[in-house]
Amino acid sequence: MTAGEPFALDADEADAIAELFNIGMGEPAAALSSMLGEEVHLSVPSFAVSTHARISRDLAPGMVPPVCAVRGAFAGPFTGEAMLIFPEQGTLALVGRLVPVDPAADGPGEMEQDALTEIGNIILNGCLASLSNLIGGEIAGTVPGYGSGDPEAVIGSAEDPVLFVRIDMALAAGDARGHALFLLDIASLDAFREAIRRTMDNL
Amino acid sequence: MTTILIVDDSRLARNMVGSVITSLRPDWTIVSAASGEEALQVIADTVPVAAIVDYNMPGMDGIVLAEHLKERFAGLPVGLLTANVQDVLRKRAEAIDVRFIAKPITSDKIREFLAAAGQ
């Protein structure tokens, strides 16, 4: 991020947004962990101003296509899109903990897609729910939908700036690694500043 | 001088914990660090009465840091402050006698931790 960009955040704001998402991910990751009977590793959230196209490019090296994603829009004090994204092999390993996966299958079938959608629902809407409790506002999520393809096809290629929060997820066994992504409209920035102030006030 | 150590990679989280501690124990000195590595350096010459450490940090995680701190300061009460509320982590903390404090932080949670720490 350069000083010339119009939506530059100062270090404190970026730090605060990342921390709010860190807290938001805690409960849903624990819920997923109990469901799978396995620890779910989470990275420290990273936060940046980016674009759909740049996010697709940045994630591509760690994502052997095709990738599978669960995505849904949300609206409230801030609006945007939440996504859970895993490479296909990781998806099969992940949902294989919950449903029997046909080893001969060349991609996720209907049952596997449903299982990933449910996992996405738990993680994404769980995170948004914790976040809304934290800041004292309601964030309405839509029912997330499943999609697959190249990272660019799934994440998009638009060049408009978005606020981008990324949390890497991995199962303890190491065979499923993916990302939870939250892409927020730039117009949400003021709402976030307000949310941070409220969170501090509520102490 | 009574010193407490606060370690979190998030400045927001450090500020939040710091402001709660200041309101509960105005005369305490707060030593804060943004990573486990930094914490072990800054605390070198000071014996804290307690430490509150984040789990999910770049570099050393909070459990490893807690082990180092307990090695250096026998009997030091350590609170693991984390959004990661998975049972496996809770058990790992309990196994080394570290108290689990779930984020988001509140005055009550810090008060309970200090009471349990005998402070």
Image (cartoon, rainbow, N blue to C red):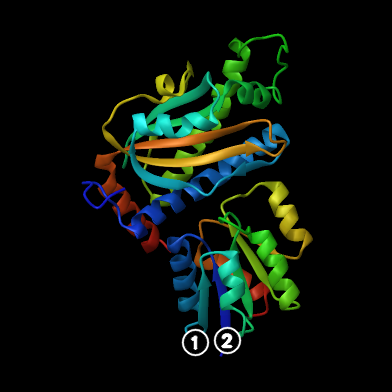
Left or right, B20 with respect to B83, comes to left
Assign a secondary structure to mark 1: loop
Q: Position of residue B75 (x, y in %)?
A: 75, 77
Q: Which kind of residue does numbered mark 1 sit on?
A: Asp
Q: Please tell me which residue is depicted at 41% across the width and 56% down the height of the picture.
A: A15
Could you tell me which residue is drawn at 24 percent across and 41 percent down? A187
**Label 1: how many Cα within 10 Å (few below 14, some 14–19, many 20+):** few
In percent of width and height, residue A164 lies at 38, 40
Position of the C terminus of chain A by quadrant:
bottom left
Farthest bottom residue?
B1
In front here: A32 or A62?
A: A62
Q: Chain of mark 1?
A: B
**Can you give x and y, in whole percent of width and height, for residue A201 in the image?**
36, 63
Q: Are marks 2 and 1 on the same chain?
A: yes
Give the residue displayed 55% in from the left and 70% down from the top: B6
Circle 2 marks a residue in which chain?
Answer: B
Give the alpha-carbon distance from disc 2 to disc 1, as whole Å. 8 Å
Q: Amino acid at mark 2?
A: Thr
Viewer-nearest residue: A163 or A129: A163
Work out whether B80 lies above or below B1.
above
Q: Is residue B109 above or below residue A35?
A: below
Residue at label 2? B2
Tags 2 and 1 touching, CB below 8 Å: yes
- Which of the marked residues, 2 or 1, is nearer the chain's N terminus? 2
In-image side of A6 versus A192 (left or right): left
Mark 2 lies on a secondary structure that is loop
Tell me where residue A191 appears, x and y as whole percent. Answer: 28, 47
Depicted A21 relative to depicted A152: above or below = below
Give whichever of A53, B85 is nearer the camera: A53
Give the number of callouts. 2
Picture disc at residue B27: 1
